[in-house]
Amino acid sequence: MTTMNYIGLEVHKKTISYCVKDVSGRIQQEGKVGSTRRELDCWMKTLPQPCTVAMEATIFSGWIYDHLLPHGTQIKVAHPLMLRAIAAAKKKNDQIDASKIADCLRCNFLPECHMMPAEIRDRRRTLRYRHLLVRQMVQMKNLVSGLLMETGVEYNKQRLHKVSYFRELLSASKEVTPSIRPLLKLSRETIERCQKTEYALVNSLQRDPVLADRIKRLRTVPGVGPITALTWALEIGDVSRFRSIKQAISYCGLCGDERSSADKVMRMPLSKQRNKHIQRALVEAAKLAPRQSHELAVIYDQERQKGNSNRATLAVARKMVAYLLAVDRQQRDFVPAEETQDFGSIKYCRNQQDEQNAQPARSCMLPTERRRSHSRGSLRIVSGLAENTNSILCDGSSELGCSREVRRGGVAYLPPYLPVVAGRHRSACRGAAEVLRHAQVATTMNIYGNALMGAKREANSKVVRMALRSA
C-alpha cells in the first residue's frame, strides 16, 4: 500500500529549499535545487510517488506552479499572511520553513489560497501593466504642470494637456524659457506614447474571445465601464469560489476588520487584507453609479444622510458587488428593478388609445454631491413648488381637482421621489419643508420638470378662482 508524501517548498529567486515528509512526519528527503525549469524537471524524477507539493505565494510561484502541474502532482499555494507559525518562530531558515510548510500540508493546516488559471493570470498581468502606464501618465502631467509653475508660465489648466493647446503654448508663449522647452517636449512625448500603449492594451483585452462575452454582460450594470468590467473579470476570476456575497465584499476590501472579545465588539476601518486593484476600481465606479441608477441613488442618499459621504460610497460599492456577482452567476445581462417590477412607472390611462401610446417612465436619477453645482435648474423648480405645495402635492379627491399624478402625453405618472401631502388643509409650511428636504438630498426633477410646471400653473389658477369666489 502506497502512502502519500508531503513536500514543502521555500521558493527564492535563485534556489528552492525542499523538505519531503511521509504521513508520520519523518523526513524522507531535504535539500536545495536551482530555480530553473531544467533543474526542476530533474528533481521531480527523484521524488517518491504519490506526492503533494505546497509552497508559499510569492512573485515566483506562478511559473513554478504552471511548470510542476503537468507532472501529475497536486500543488497547493499557501497564503503568506496566514503562515504565522513560520514568522513567529525563534529560529528561522529556509530548511525550517520548508519543513513547517510540509507539516502544515500533512496535518491539513495549510491556509490555501486560490490560484487563478494561467490564461487569466496572463491577461491580468496585462491589465496591471496598463495601470502602471496610467500612473506614469499622471506623474508626467504633474511634472509638466510643475515645470510651468516653477518658471511662472501662465497656462489654462483645463486645456494644458490638449495636443493643439500644448503646441500653441510652446510656440507662442514668450514665458516658456529655453531651459524647460526640451523637458516639456520630452514629457509630452512620453505622455502620448503611454496613451497609445494604454489604448492598445485595453482594446486587445476587450476583443479577447475569452473575456468578450463576460465583459459585455458586466457592462450592463450601472456605473460599470470597460476598465471596471475588466478588473472584475480578471481579479475575481471564477465567482463560484465565493459562497456568499459577504465573502466577495470582504475580498474586494469593502468592509472593516472586527475585533471582538467576550461581549465587546469593535469594528475597525477598512481591512488591508484585500485585493487593492478591484477595491480601487469599485470605489471609483461607485462615485458615478448613483447618477445612472435609481436604486443606487437611494442607497447613497440613505447613507449620506448619516453624515459620511465615504460610507455612502462604500455602501454603493457593496451593492455593485452584489449586482456583478449575480450577473456572473446567472450568465445574463443586468436588468434594473424599474423594468422588472415596473417601479416608479404607475400608469393611469384615460382611454384605450392612451394605453397603447403609454410608455413607462424612466427611473429618476439622483445627482450626487458632485452634480449639485450643475443642477440649479432642478432646485429652482423644487423651491418654486415649495411656495404652493398643495397645488401639486394635495390629495386627488380635494375640491381643487388636482392630483398627485403628473400628466405626460395623456398618461399620468407618479414620480417615485415626490413626497405626498394628503389633504389641501395640511399645513403649507410642513409641505414646503418636506419638499425642500427632498431637494437638499438632491431629488432631481429633470424628467418631470415641464409637466410639474404646467400642473403648478393650472393649480394656482384654480386656487385664485376659489379665493375670489369665497371673497
Image (spheres, rainbow, N blue to C red):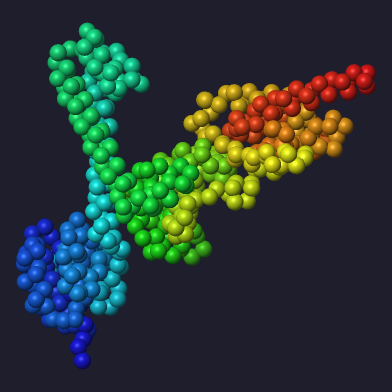
Q: Is residue 411 visible?
A: yes
Q: Is residue 208 above or below residue 92?
A: above
Image quarter (top left, top right, bottom left or bottom right) of the C terminus: top right
Instruction: Please identify the residue farthest to the top as the structure is shown.
Output: 174
Image quarter of residue 48: bottom left
User: Which residue is drawn at the image coordinates 64% and 34% (left, top)?
Assistant: 438
Q: Is residue 41 above or below residue 173?
A: below
Residue 100 pos. (x, y %): 21, 72
Q: Is residue 355 above or below residue 424?
A: below
Nearest the viewer among 365 and 438 is 365
Image quarter (top left, top right, bottom left or bottom right) of the N terminus: bottom left
Nearest the viewer among 400 and 298 is 400
Residue 385 pos. (x, y %): 71, 26
Q: How many marks?
A: 0
Residue 11 pos. (x, y %): 15, 63
Image quarter of residue 200: top left
User: Which residue is drawn at the image coordinates 24% and 47% (left, top)?
Assistant: 126
Q: Is residue 77 left or right of residue 241?
A: left
Residue 462 pos. (x, y %): 83, 24
User: Which residue is drawn at the image coordinates 23% and 70% (left, top)?
Assistant: 75
Nearest the viewer among 155 and 110 is 155
User: Which residue is drawn at the image coordinates 72% and 38% (left, top)?
Assistant: 354
Q: Is residue 344 left or right of residue 314?
A: right
Image quarter of residue 73: bottom left
Nearest the viewer among 254 and 44 is 44
Q: Is residue 270 visible?
A: no
